[in-house]
Each structure stands twice: as structure tokens, then as C-alpha cells.
Amino acid sequence: MYIVMLGAPGTGKGTIGKILSQDLNLVHVSTGDMFREQINKKTELGKKIQSYMESGNLVPDDVTIETVKTRLLEEDVKEGAILDGFPRTVVQAEALREFLKENKPGAKRVAIELDVPDDEIIKRVVNRLICTNKSCGAIYNKETKPPKKEGICDVCGSELKRRQDDNEETVTKRLGIYHQNSKELIDFYRKNNALYSIYPKDLEIAVRNIKKFLEEYKKGVR
């Protein structure tokens, strides 16, 4: 099963996606992580991606689609994956559908929408701290979930940092772009009877409800 995590930046797609990844034994594939890897390697693609991300714009469809297609051909995702940050447009959703038809015939595809108010998202993002250890990637919030020791990850002891693009101006711009694109994208999955929408106010309850939906969807109950 290929599970698409939908939602604006800061809704918890990464956090919930990683929990589902562990519980369902599916690889968590984050376009953000792939993009940042290119940026850190200082590749030509990474330089282009960085310019889009720092300005608050989305990476163009063709670059995003090619990056994800390449990743989904790897051995560890042949049985499915949690897709975090892709697709973000109907063009990307259609590309994913055609890719799976051609390369993964019979694979189920479903979208989980995390629906959170904009004002709450902004508060989450501007106070977000992320572990610099890529294999850990724990996420904290200076107000609602601070680390026990300032600037240090509780899990692995690595340094915590705020992403350069986690500021109110960039987040507000991203939210505007997301809302412009999301209606058609959400409608795309709704029309395909492959959408589950939830407000993840309580993380534990949200994960439990999502897993219940996925189990019923897999069995064909939904």
C-alpha cells in the first residue's frame, strides 16, 4: 500500500508518517529529506531546490516527480511506502497514479489529509526544532514540546536546530500556495474514494483512527 500524507506544512505529516512507517512496516519517504540531501551535497539540483525553498515556493512538478519516481524504484519500497510531501498538485497525483499502474500493478493507493487551522500551523512551525542527526530526526516545539536540555535531542543527544525556512513570512506564503493547490488535489483523491481527512489534535487518537481506516480500506470495507 502506498499512503499519501496530505496537509499543509506543519500539520504533523512527518511525525504521523514516521509512526505509521514503524507500525505498518513501510518506509517513510519524505520529499523534503530528499531535497535537503541534494542541498547538503551542493549539487546543481540542490542549488535550484534551495532557491525555491528559501523563497517559500514549491519545487516545480517535473523536478519533484523525477526525484520521487527514482526513489520508488528502489528495493526497500517495492511493497509500499509512506509518501510525505508528495504529491502536492494534481499533476503530481496523476503522475504517481500512472507510475504505480505501470510499475506496481494492483498496489493500493490512499491519501490521509491532516486538516489543521492556519494559525495553529504557524505557531507550530516558528517554534519547531529538529534533531540534526538524520537517522533520528526527532521534532520538538519550544512551547509545547521542549527538549529536556535546551538545544539537545532527548533521544540521541545530537544538536537541535531550527530550519532556515521555518519563519512566519515563509510559512504564511507556503500556506497560501498550499491552499491554492490543495482543493483540486483533495478532490482528486475524494473522487477516487481514496481519502481520509482528520484533525490530529491528539496524536495518539489520530494515529489510532488512521490505522483503523487503513485496515478497513485494505480489506475493502471502505
Image: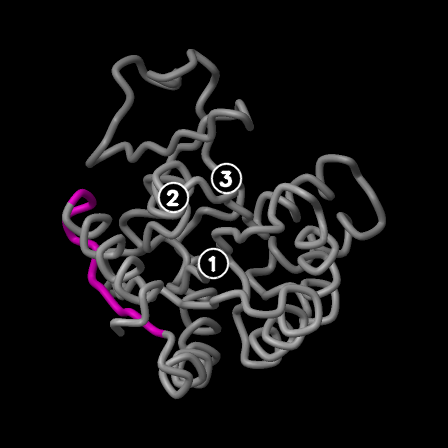
**As rendered, which of 169 and 145 lies closer to the eye?**
145
**As rendered, which of 208 and 169 lies closer to the eye?**
208
Q: Secondary structure at mark 2?
A: helix
Question: Mark 1 or 3 closer to N-term?
Answer: 1
Lateral position of residue 184 relative to residue 222, left or right: right
Q: Is residue 202 magenta?
A: yes
Residue at left offset 80%, top offset 39%: 42
User: What amino acid is at disc 1?
Assistant: Met
- Residue 111, percent across and down? 40, 67
Residue, disc 3: 163
**As rendered, which of 21 and 179 lies closer to the eye?**
21
Give the image quarter of residue 190: bottom left
User: What amino acid is at disc 2?
Assistant: Leu
Q: Is residue 123 magenta?
A: no
Question: Mark 1 or 2 closer to N-term?
Answer: 1
- Residue 185, percent across and down? 46, 79
How many numbered marks are there?
A: 3
Residue at left offset 34%, top offset 39%: 23
Residue, disc 2: 24
Mark 1: few, some, or many residues within 10 Å (few <14, many ≥20)? some
Mark 3: few, some, or many residues within 10 Å (few <14, many ≥20)? few
Mark 2 → mark 3, Cα distance in angstroms? 29 Å
Residue 125 versus residue 192 in the image, above or below: above
User: What amino acid is at disc 3?
Assistant: Arg
Question: Mark 2 or 3 closer to N-term?
Answer: 2
- Residue 102, percent across and down? 70, 72
Q: Secondary structure at mark 3?
A: loop
Q: What residue occupies the far right of the structure in this picture?
A: 44
- For the magenta stretch, what is the residue range? 195-204
Residue, disc 1: 1
